[in-house]
Image (cartoon, helix red, strand yellow):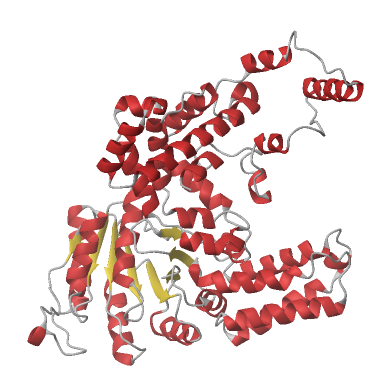
Amino acid sequence: MAAFSSLTDRLSNAFKHLKSKGKLSEADIDGTIREIRRALLDADVSLDVVRSFTARVRERALGAEVSEALNPAQQVVKIVNDELTDILGQGVDRPLNFAKNPPTIIMLAGLQGAGKTTLAGKLGYWLKDSGHTPLLVAADLQRPNAVTQLEVVGERAGVPVYAPEKGVQSAGGDAVSAPGETTGDPVKVARDSIEYARQKLYDTVIIDTAGRLGVDETLMQQARDIRDAVQPNEILFVIDAMIGQDAVRTAQAFDEGVDFTGVVLSKLDGDARGGAALSVASVTGKPILFASNGEGLKDFEVFHPDRMASRILDMGDILTLIEQAQREFDEEQTREAAAKMAEGSFGLDDFLAQLQQVRKLGSMKSLLGMIPGMAQHRKELEQFDEREIDRTEAIIRSMTPEERRDPKIIDGSRRARIAYGSGVTVSAVNALLQRFEQAAKMMKRMSNKAGMGGFPGMGGPGGGKKSKKGKKGKKGGSKSGNPMKREAEEKALRARLSGKPSSGGSAFAKKQGTPQLPEGLQDAFGGELPPNLGGGLSGLLG
């Protein structure tokens, strides 16, 4: 989501001055609209889109839904969220059109450098993970080494590649081919691949076509010829999210040339301003179906306009986070981990297993970026080193099974051995063990506080014994001779027994409660941090 980071910051600043006002004047709304307009233009959103967007927001903001709202500032944010969702394609988002009689044919089109070949591998991996049997087709016979690149991407994704022609190859030096040179017939390759897919029982064919540095008639004619030869079920226009103002012109040219059916945004992890995403769907009326936000095969997701709008407005994307967790986490393993947390027997082996489950979800930066309000911590997120997780894993793997089960036995000589085996300093091992001890205590408190059920829905044991122990208090202990102090002690004891918080006591006692979740997570997790994404895990990673 780096492509929208600047826009997120600008929009957040535009709403700041509204929060302290119980009633909004026309001047307040006009000032906010002005800031929103500047933010969108700075993000390279099309001028026509900006004009229509701000006009609709102003009209609604001056209406009864804001003037009669209990919290006008939040109502303005809701209006901007609704209109942003509309721009991104609300109502036109849909799944892929699969053929009734396989194979389903998907043709990729776009300019050279937009990321079509890489995206073909990601789409193939996603379809394979969804239970399909995809086939990648190398019909880009113009760009040097395009066929080789697709074969490499296909091998990484575990998806077969149909490549009867090797296309233009360059081994360096004099072997580099001239620009625009083409070998073989891409239309024949595309046509033959459909029959090959039927024979080998592949249910989806993804055709990677050639691009150009700019829109020209040669490019469009070749794309039309391939389209007419294979009659694809989907023509996906792949557009670089960093293209800026030129996005609208390019999208319109491809829409007129090949009449694409859907859009795929690539390079959303780039540091450009990302206005393409906010312009293409609105101008062409075609839905954005997928978004690519990284180099990895898993950095690919179905595009949801409402969720993307929430991310841009720094309201998080909890639904996507939960969906990823449900898809990747081992439920039985999670239940066992929750029970061990409640019992206080959660060891480093268990932590390592939980860490590996979290890593299946993707990078920690992208996961944390889905939590509401994280834009204000962007600097910390950008400075987070993903290799820290590798170092943590290396330290744990350098321990013996006995040391993982009971970290208390790790003395000075053992720490030196672990540090040497994992390639880190002794201080790094000490820091991990200290953080693990603190996190284990906190996770046990959270489990006991959740009652007999442990964590919500996890079925872990409760803290019955501890509560009995707590009721005994300091039996037989001496009372203070100072009447005022004795009265304060008795009042604090009554408060503890009744379950009410005491107004006195040490300031350290206030820190023992369950960490507070952001507002957007309260409902999603029932008010408690989940065991895999809780404060204990984040504490362990520093």
**Looking at this view, is 396 or 484 the one in front?**
484
**Is residue 542 positioned above or below 430 on the image?**
below
Q: Is residue 155 left or right of residue 426?
A: left
Residue 1: percent from left, percent from top: 50, 65
Q: Is residue 130 left or right of residue 30?
A: left
Residue 200: percent from left, percent from top: 18, 54
Q: Is residue 429 left or right of residue 163?
A: right
Residue 139: percent from left, percent from top: 22, 73
User: Image point 39% across, 84% down: which residue?
Assistant: 257
User: Image point 26% across, 42% down: which residue?
Assistant: 420
**Outermost residue, front direction?**
481
Q: Is residue 243 left or right of residue 458?
A: left
**Looking at this view, is 239 or 226 the one in front?**
239
Q: Looking at the image, can residue 446 be seen? A: yes
Residue 73: percent from left, percent from top: 79, 65
**Is residue 337 positioned above or below 280 on the image?**
above
